[in-house]
Amino acid sequence: MTLGTPSVRRIRGALVAVISLSLAVIPVETATAAPPPGDAAVVFPKPQSTTTRPETVRIPHTVNLVVADNADRSAVGVVREVLDAAGVRRVDDRHSPLTVYVGRHPDALGALDIKGVEGMGAEGYVVAVGTGKDRRSRIVVAGVDGAGTFYAAQTLRQVVTGQTVRGVEIRDWPSLRWRGVVEGFYGPPWSHEARLDSFDFFGRHKMNLYFYTPKDDPYLRAEWRRPYPPDQLARLGELVDRATADHVEFGYVLSPGLSICYSRPSETDTLIAKFTTLHQLGARMFVIALDDIDYQRWNCDEDRAAFGTGAAAAAKAQAHVINRVQREFIATHPGTQPLQTVPTEYWGTRRSAYTDTLASQVDPAVVVQWTGLDVISRTITTQDMAAAHANFQHPMLIWDNYPVNDYVPGRLLLGPLTGREPGLGASSTGLAANPMSQEQASKPALFTVADYTWNDTAYDPARSWAAGLADLAGENNRALAALTTFADVNYSSRLNERQAPRLSADVDQFWKTGSPAAVARLHNALRQVRGAPEVLRESLPNPGFLTETKPWLDATQAWGQAGLTALDMLVAQRMGNGDLAWARRQALPGLVATARSFTTDWPDPNTKVPVVIDPVIDRFVKAAIDENDRWLGVQPSRTSPVTNLPVYNESQLPLDNMVDGDPDTYFWGGAPAKPGTVVGVDLGRVRPVTGVDVQMAKPDRLDDYIQHGVVEYSTDGTAWTTGPAFGSSPRVTVDLGSVQARFVRLNATQEQPNWVVVREFEAHVADGPSVSGAPAGDFDRAADNRPHTAYRASRTPTAGEALTLTLPAARTLTKVIVLADARAEVQVRSGGRWNTIGRLSGGYTELPARGLAADAIRLMWTADSPAPVVSEIVPHYAR
C-alpha cells in the first residue's frame, strides 16, 4: 500500500482531525507583547526599587532637554536616541509641556517629590517620570556618577516604549561591583567587530567589565613578549575607546606562563612594557594569568636555582613577578585598578602548598580570580566564596565558565545562568562570565549574567531568560516564538542538565497519557521545532546570530522532522495501519542520519565536530521505535552494557548507546584506558555465544579505542575465560566458536593516553531462530529482532528459491508479520507440511496463521520478485 492510497489518506485525515480538535482547547504559548501604552514598563536588569505613579506622561513632538554641565556624554547620547525613537523632533522647546533632565537636577526631582541620588553608592541612579504640582511633566535621568547617569539612560530606553509613559520612580544600584565578560575561551577569538558590538551590548545591560584574553591570540600567550604591530595596536585602541564610551572597564590580560623565566629581570621588564603600551591606549585594568600551565616544570634553569622545585616554589616565583609589577607599574600609575592574577590552582577550596605560598607572598592588594569549586561550577555559594577567600586571603573575582563551550564545541549553550547564590558581592569584587566563541549566540546567557550581577536577590533565571530572548528578537513576536523554541532545544549545560524543558514536558505528557490532546500538543511542539529555523532565517533581525548558529539551525530542523515522523508512526500504529507505520519507520534512519550529519569546524577549520542539540527528540525517536517494536511483536534485547570507565557525558553520550544497534551513536568513557579497563555486555542469561563485533573510535577521535586487549567471557561475572587478543584497530571482530557465556567484554592490557569511544558492542548468540535459503545474503538479519537491519539478497531469485526461518520448536501461530520488499508466498510448516497463508503485499504484510502449530516459516519467491530485502519475519504465538 502506498502513501497516496485512500486508506492512508483517511488515517492522515484522522490525525489532522485529532490535532485540529485538540488545538481548539489547548492554549498555544505565544510571545509576550510589549505592555499597553500607559502601563509600567518591565526593566532589565531588574531594578532594586520601582514605584509606579498614578499619572501618565505624554511624549510630544517637541521637548525641552536640559543637560547638567557635568552630565555623562554617552548618557546624553542615549537619551537623545530614546527621544528620537519616541517621535521627538526638537529638544530645545522651552515652552514644551515636557522637560527632560539629564544629570543631577535636585530641583526637578523635588518638583516630583522624589529624593535625589545623594547617599547612593557608586553607579547608583534615579529615573523619574511624572507630573508635578505645577502640572508640568518631567523626566529625570540622574546618576551618582557618570556611569550611574549612563545606566539611568539605559533604563529610560526601556521605560519609554511609545508616546505615553506611566509615571514611575526607579531607584537602582548594582549588587556586584564588577559585572562583565572574560573573553577567555580556547579556539577562534571574537572578531574586532564582534567586540565592538559586545561593548554596546554590555553597556545597554549595565555590565561594566571586559577582560581581553582570548587563548588563541599569540600576543597574549604563546608570543607574549612580541610588541603589537601598529595596525593591531590601533585596533586595540579602538576597543579601549568604545569600551570607555560604554562605561566598560577594558581589562588587559597577559598569559606568560608557558615560557616565562620568572627570575630573569628582563622578562618582567617586557611584561611591564606591554602593560605600559596598553595603559597609553587608555586601559586601566591589568591581569597576569598563570592558568592552564604545568607549574612543576620550569622554563629556564635559573628558576630552579632561584626558587627550588614543587608547587610552593612555583607560587614563590609567580609572586616574585606579580609583586614587581604591582610595585613598579600599578603603584606608579594613579587611577589604575588593582592588579589581578589568575593562579595556576584557580578552582576549588583545598589548601595546598601552592595556595599557602601564594596567599602569604603576593601583595595583599592583588585580586585573585577563581572559577568556583570546579573549572565549570554547577553552583557557587557564599559559603564557597568564603572558603576560597580564606584559602587565598586576597580580594576575589569570580571567573565564571558559563556559557563557554570550548569543552563541548558541538553544543550551543543558550540557557540562563543558574546556581549562583545571592550575596556573592559581599565576599567578591565581582563576576566575569566566559562566553562562547559565538558572540551573538552568547547574548541570551550573558543577558541573564547581567541581570544576576546587577540585582542578585531579585534574579529569576526563567524570567530573565525569556527577557534575554525577547531582547535578541527585537520587537518581532514571530521571531521570538521561534527563538524560544530553538533556545529550548539548546538549553542544557553543566550548570543545569535539564534538557529542552518545554519540549520535554510535552513528550512526557504524551507518554504519560497518550490522549488526543497530548498527541496534538506534541505534534504542535515538534512542528515548531521543525519550523523555527526557517522562521528565524526570515524574521530575526540579527544576521550574525544566523551565521554563527547555521549548523545548529539545520540540525534542529532535521530533528524536528525526525520527531514528527516518529509521532506519525505511533499514531498510525495506534490506528492499526501497519503500512503507514512501517513506511514512517523506514524513513526514520535516514532522517536521523541527516539530523546527525551536521558539523561545525570550530575550533579547527580542518576538523569537523558533530553538532548536537539537547537529545530529547533523539530519545523520543528511540522510544517510539521501541514502542513500534513491541507493536510489531519484535522481542526486545535483554543485553545491558557494562564498563568500569566513568561516563564522560551521561546526558549526551550514555552507556546505553553502545548497545542500541546504531553505530552513529556512541558511549564515551571519561578516562584513558589502562590495564583492567573493561567494556562489555551482560546478555541477561547464559547463552551460546559464537563471537563479538565491537566498533570503537569516531571520525574526530580516531585513536579513542582500546588499543591493546583481550576478549573475555564468563557465565557468572566472577570467573573469566580469556579469549583471543586484539590490537591496533578500532574494530574488533572475534570468532569464539560456540561458548556458554552471560558476560562478554574487552579487557585492556596496556596503558594508553586516549579515552575510549564505543559505538556498538554486539555479542553473536546462537539460541534463536535460524535463517537459511537463497539467494545468498546476511540471512540472520531477517530475524534478528532489529527491523532496521535487513537480509539483502545478492541477486534476483530463481524458481524454487526461498528464505526459511526455522523456529527453535513447534509452537501455535496466531499470525505472521513480514517486513519486506519482495514478492513471495508466505508459508508455514506444520506437521512436516508447508501451508500457504498468503502473499507479501507491500512493505508491511500481516497474515493470520489459523492456529497452526508450526516449526518454520518460509518465503517462497515468485518469478517476478526483485532482489529480496527482508527486514524482519515476526512470528506471533498463541499464549
Image: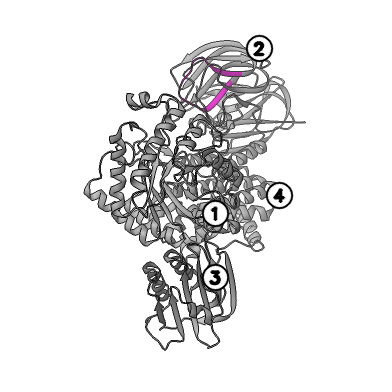
The residue under the point 53% across, 21% down is: 693
Using residue 872 as the reference point, say whether residue 190 is left or right of it: left
The residue at which mark 4 appears reads as 513
Q: Residues within 10 Å of mark 3 (few under 14, many from 20)?
A: many
Cα separation between marks 4 and 1: 20 Å
What's drawn in magenta, residue-wise? 744-763
The residue at which mark 1 appears reads as 527
Task: Name the one closer to the observer, 709 or 752.
Answer: 752
Tag of residue 461: none
Cα separation between marks 4 and 3: 48 Å
Identify the residue at the far right of this view: 879
The residue at which mark 3 appears reads as 170
Q: Is residue 5 visible?
A: no
What kind of element bears circle 4? helix
Q: Position of residue 283 (x, y in %)?
A: 34, 53
Of callouts 4 and 1, the N-terminal one? 4
Observer-side mark, 2 or 1, equals 2
Q: Is residue 118 above or below residue 601?
A: below
Q: Are marks 2 and 3 in contact (CB under 8 Å)?
A: no
Of callouts 2 and 1, the N-terminal one? 1
Q: Is residue 773 above or below residue 516?
A: above
Observer-side mark, 4 or 3, equals 3
Observer-side mark, 1 or 3, equals 3
Q: Is residue 160 visible?
A: yes
Q: Amino acid at mark 3?
A: Ile
The residue at which mark 2 appears reads as 719
Of callouts 4 and 3, the N-terminal one? 3
